[in-house]
Image: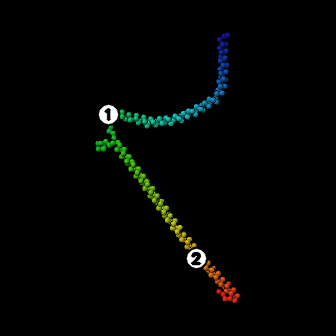
Amino acid sequence: MPITAKRRKARKEAEAALARLQGLAKDRADRIGPYADQAREQAARTLLQARGWTAPRLENAALRVEDTVAPRVAGLLTAAAQRVDPVPARRGLRLGGRRVPRGLLIGGAALAGGVLVYSLIRMRQASQDAEWQEHLDQAREQVRETRENLEEKVSKTADKAADKVEKTADAAKEKAQDAKETVKTASGDRSKENGRPGR
């Protein structure tokens, strides 16, 4: 068998094997594809959870470095700069050639701040007290006016009621007088009819 025929046969066998393998790979891909999608989604969820877990810890680590390591490094660099400086600067506040202690300065500033805060609070309280007193005075004035109005209305109502009672009493007396006269007249007429003198 010539070499070219062998090559052709080998090429055909290779192509057939490749086609078989591609078909097999396609079948496997169709079967495994949904599992791969699920795995991709699960990996995305897990990555998101890992990032959510890692972010606060990194932030805490950064804050710790900022609060603990950074001041120390800054202090060391400052101290090194002062040692290296050929003409050191005079530090701190000086009054009359004497250095004022830092604690005294901080204490004075704190005292001044405390006095300022206390005075602001007192001023605010005084303004609130004045406002409350004004509202209280207004409420008292309204109560006084309401009481006077009620007293006036009560006295008018009492006067009207007394007048009505008096008129009713006068009307009742008149009716009683009329009734007596009617009774006397009626009894006088009967006595005349009976021949007896009237009472």
Q: Mark on residue 166?
A: 2
29 and 103: which is toward the camera: 103
Q: What percent of the width, then of the height, locates residue 38?
A: 62, 31
Q: Is residue 184 left or right of residue 84?
A: right
* Residue nearest the observer in this picture, 131 or 7: 131
- Tell me the kind of residue under disc 1: Pro
| Mark 1 touches mark 2? (CB < 8 Å) | no
Q: Label 1 belongs to which residue?
A: 86
Name the image quarter holding residue 8: top right
Rendered residue at 54%/35% (across/down): 52
Q: Position of residue 83 (x, y in %)?
A: 34, 33
Where disc 2 sits, the SS reads helix
Q: Secondary structure at mark 1?
A: loop
Sequence-earlier tag: 1 or 2:
1
Quadrant where the N terminus is found in the figure: top right
**Which label lies toward us, 1 or 2?**
2
- Bin the neighbour count of mark 1 within 10 Å (Cα to Cα): few under 14, some 14-19, many 20 and up: few
Q: Nearer the viewer, residue 89 or 148?
A: 148
Residue 136 position in % (x across, y down): 47, 60
x 43%, y 54%: residue = 125
Residue 30 to residue 156: above or below: above
Cα distance in 3D space between marks 1 and 2: 116 Å
Whole-percent x and y of residue 173? 61, 79
- Mark 2 residue crowding within 10 angstroms, few (<14) / some (14–19) / many (20+): few
**Residue at 46% across / 37% down in the picture?**
63
Amino acid at circle 2: Glu
In this rendering, the count of numbered labels is 2
